[in-house]
Amino acid sequence: RACDRIVAISENVRNRVRRFYRRDASVIFPPVATSRFRFLELGDTWLSVNRLYPEKRIELQLEVFRRLPEEKLLLVGGYTAGDLAGRYVRSLNVPPNVTLLGEVPSGQLAELYGRCRGLVTTAVDEDFGMTPVEAMAAGKCVLATDEGGYRETVVRGATGFLVPPTPEAFVEAIRRLDDSTLLSMRAACVARARQFDETLFLEKMKATIAR
């Protein structure tokens, strides 16, 4: 069916629309309730928040922390019972310094962001990726694969780092990040997250509909 206009959630998706549908689209980033997140402390544990599916490259995260036994990772997220993801999760070899928390309530998730060292996210060609914005809203650094929507939210060297999807690259990046470096990024992270706040989404959607 024909449509008048297409709105994409990122430049990454806009490029896909051009490639597959040969049409242009405007971009309105998804709404993130940034006010729900705040810095609480710089803890001793890294955080990962994602569904447990192969395209999220969970095995890459596990390998990174297998090579960093002195570091710890909390992995938040679940999967839909009955699909092939269950087999994928059972195949994962989880090292002792990684804890799988499953799905957690929104309040607990906000606290995990507020107390972690930073966010690790490794999805394949992510459409946009809301978790980096949530982490930055809590004043936390983001380590993400250098691809997809992550390139549109993470500011290299200021709010995080975009690295190749290899264990070596992530291990090197984590080893470089001491407490003072992570704390120095706090203000830039919070300011960057505000650029994706839900209030801006509502303004842009209303303007688009009005046109």
Image: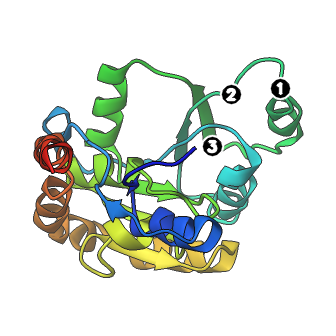
Q: Which mark is residue 35?
A: none
Q: Are marks 2 and 3 in contact (CB under 8 Å)?
A: no
Residue hosting label 1: 83
Label 1 CA crowd tier, 10 Å (few <14, some 14–19, many 20+): few
For the point 84% across and 39% down, the residue is 88
Q: CA gap, disc 3 to disc 1?
A: 24 Å
Residue hosting label 2: 79
* Left or right of 141 in this view: 85: right
For the point 65% across and 51% down, the residue is 56
Which label lies toward us, 2 or 3? 2
Q: Are marks 1 and 2 in contact (CB under 8 Å)?
A: yes
Q: How many marks?
A: 3
Q: How is the image coloured?
A: rainbow
Give the x, y percent position of residue 107: 29, 21
Q: Which mark is residue 98?
A: 3
Amino acid beneath label 2: Tyr
The quarter of the rendered structure image containing the N terminus is top right
8 w.r.t. 145: above or below: above
Give the x, y percent position of residue 95: 73, 46
Q: Give the mark, 2 or 3, whose residue is nearer the N terminus.
A: 2
Q: CA gap, disc 2 to disc 3?
A: 18 Å
Q: Quadrant of residue 165?
A: bottom right
Q: Nearer the viewer, residue 87 or 179?
A: 87
* Secondary structure type for disc 3: strand
Q: Quadrant of residue 110?
A: top left
For the point 11% across and 61% down, the residue is 191
* Secondary structure type for disc 2: loop
Q: Give the mark, 3 or 1, whose residue is nearer the N terminus.
A: 1
